[in-house]
Amino acid sequence: METKKQGSKTRQEEDRRPLFFGLGFGILFGFLLHKGGATKYDVIVGQLLLTDYTVLKIMLSAIVTGMIGIYLMKSMGWIKLSIKSGSVGKNVIGGLIFGVGFAVLGYCPGTIAGAIGNGYLDAIVGGLAGILLGTWIFAVIYPKLKDGILKKGDFGDITFPRLFKVNDWVVVVPAAVLIILILVWLERAGF
């Protein structure tokens, strides 16, 4: 490993910093999921039955916060977005894998991690095993899927601002306002 000095820090120390930031933000995200109630099986099932909108409110809040934060950092030149190409096939396969896991166990990958942190046995045994088994199965069959169904309906690396040929903020601001209005409506309606 290279350990050339750059200022007062070595390259090895510099390379690990993003990992610690990621770990810190992951712990914070898990804590907030827990505090919001999204790691509880009953809350997740309530969302699926459309009787408890806690998870929807958490996700919409995360989407609007992340969207504004990412595009603010992009406009300040702090980051460069690397958009991955998408397709109908990728969305269908991903949605099926996600949906089956969600329906069988009542957790999504993020809430499984939070529930494991809470010590919930169903998340530790079923969730962790499901993630590992599902990842392994997908890795095994991926070579057969990548040039077949995953390419169906390829729409490239398009984003709404690119599609409409407008500045990012022309899409971000109205989307953020719409999401905030939905959140306000959900709260006032008692959901």
Image: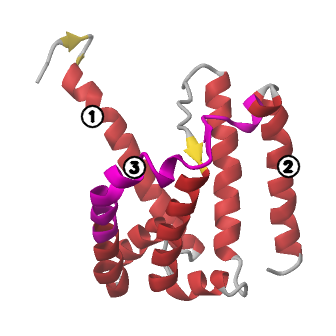
Residue that badge 3 annotates: 24
* Marks 2 and 3, how far apart at CA: 29 Å
Q: Is residue 137 above or below residue 175?
A: below
- The residue at 27%/10% (across/down) is 7
Label 2 vs label 3, nearer the camera? 2
Measuring from the top left, give residue 112's x and y in whole percent: 42, 72
Residue 53 badge: none
Look at the picture and state if 102 lies above or below 92. Answer: below
Magenta segment main secondary structure = helix
Instruction: State which quarter of the image contains the C terminus.
Output: bottom right
Residue 59 horizontal side relative to residue 100, left or right: right
Q: Which residues are magenta?
A: 133-162
Tell me the SS state at disc 3. Answer: helix
Q: Which residue is mark 2?
A: 177
* 81 inside magenta stretch: no
Secondary structure category for the residue under label 1: helix
Q: Nearer the viewer, residue 129 or 100?
A: 100
Give amino acid for label 1.
Answer: Arg
Disc nearer the start of the sequence (3/1): 1
| Residue 65 appears anywhere in the view | yes
What amino acid is found at the position of numbered circle 3 in the picture? Gly
Q: Residues within 10 Å of mark 2 (few under 14, many from 20)?
A: few
What amino acid is at disc 2?
Val
Q: Is residue 165 left or right of residue 110?
A: right
Residue 74 quadrant: top right
Q: Residue at x 36, y 86 (%)?
A: 122
Q: Earlier in the sequence, mark 1 or mark 2?
A: 1
Q: Which residue is mark 1?
A: 16
Judge whether 11 appears above or below 112 on screen.
above
Q: What residue is shown at x 27% (from left), y 34% (from top)?
A: 16
Estimate the spatial distance between the alpha carbons at disc 1 and disc 2, rounded to whole Å: 37 Å
- Whether residue 143 appears in magenta in the rendering, the answer is yes
